[in-house]
Image (cartoon, rainbow, N blue to C red):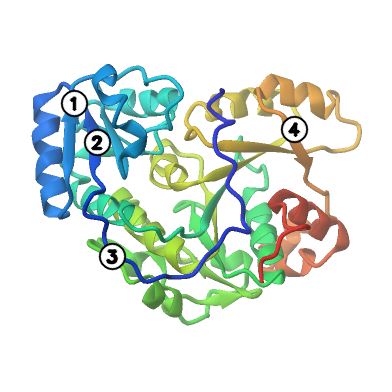
Amino acid sequence: MSRHQQSDSHLNRAHGPEQWLPDEAAETLLVTGIEVLRNEVERIVAAAGGRLRTVQDVSEAAPFWDLAAAVLVGSDILDLPPRRRAPAVLVGLAGEGDSLWHLAAAIGAERVAVLPEAATWLAEYLSRSRSPEAGGLVLGVTGGCGGAGATTAAIWLAQAAARYGARVLLVDGDPWGGGLELALAAEDSDGLRWPDLAGASGSIDPYQLRDSLPEAGGFSFLSWPGNREQPGVDAVSVSGVLDAARRAFELVVLDIGRGREVLRAFAWECDRMVLLAPAQLRAAVATARLLHELPPVETALVLRVKPGAALDEFHIAEAVGLRLHGIMPEVRGVAAATERGRLLESGQQRGVRRFAEALLDLSGGDLG
């Protein structure tokens, strides 16, 4: 199974908080032979009030793998037992660098925790892993090259989902993009922005977060401010905010920038990805390179095809290495609409609505 053909999450899953009691029998499985990692995780699991089983290799782990509430693997584990679910988290130590992210993509790990910095996040994650509450879908949208139209597509997708009655949050995951709120003409809307949440630690109440965010186009949004304030990305804070968002909304649409630090902070929180690219050879090469930085989740390729393109969309998709999922409609004046904050108006057009609904697979769903 390829790294982009794993889980098939759906929007029309059951949502809503349910009363639950922690399952005392549920345990976390840690697979590693690195003593320092084992000691760090033992301390974290104890703080989370959970139970931990530690084994040194995958052969010893196989009988317990699919019964565990969460599976953690250390950076020394390069292979997985056959026919087992992907590990929840790859844990490593500060200083291991890019190798952690490359390994996580290779083995299909859902998250990466760099210890000891991510200790608080990991404790919260393991506490939630014992809860049966499903949470919403996090859908990431990013461009394979600059100017691919990721922000436009993200806004249209959030607008389409809200039209069907879903509780939707649109998140600005591009600190250097100038502020998504400007494209929505919502810079004066009351509510929290990313700087208000900087340094957030511990559990964030999902419903307080939802009630504190501004709205536009029928959905909530969380933006970097459209001003000269210097942005910054704190991956631990981002993870905490998005975990709360997942519990408060049915769909979280992430408009993700392309820098490596930004991709690691935002893209690795996603259940699915949409990757946009112009139907051009250089764009295809850049998109194929970016693909290696994305998490091992289902990824849909969407192309922008201009009349008279030298290569057809299927050759471009083959060059990227993904199956073509759709063509983004060319809307006259969309660049000007972005500048004037009128993208929501263009999202009402019939062709745009069909495109967004097909991409979300909402046409036969029961959201709302």
Of residues 345 and 36, the one nearer the viewer is: 36
* Viewport quadrant of the C terminus: bottom right
Left of 77 or right of it: where is 331? right
Label 4 SS: strand
Residue type marked 3: Leu
Label 2 SS: strand
Q: Does the image show residue 239?
A: yes
Q: Nearer the viewer, mark 2 or mark 3?
A: 3
Q: CA distance from mark 1 to mark 2?
A: 8 Å
Q: Which mark is residue 301?
A: none
Q: Nearer the viewer, mark 2 or mark 4?
A: 2
Q: What residue is disc 3 on? A: 21
Task: Tell me where residue 52 sits by quadrant.
Answer: top left
Q: Is residue 25 above or below residue 344?
A: above
Q: Is residue 222 above or below residue 123?
A: below
Left of 183 or right of it: where is 118? left
Q: Which mark is residue 55?
A: 1
The residue located at (41%, 61%) in the rendering is 133
* Viewport quadrant of the N terminus: top right
- The picture places residue 349, in percent across and down from the top left corner, at 84, 64
Q: CA distance from mark 2 to mark 3?
A: 20 Å
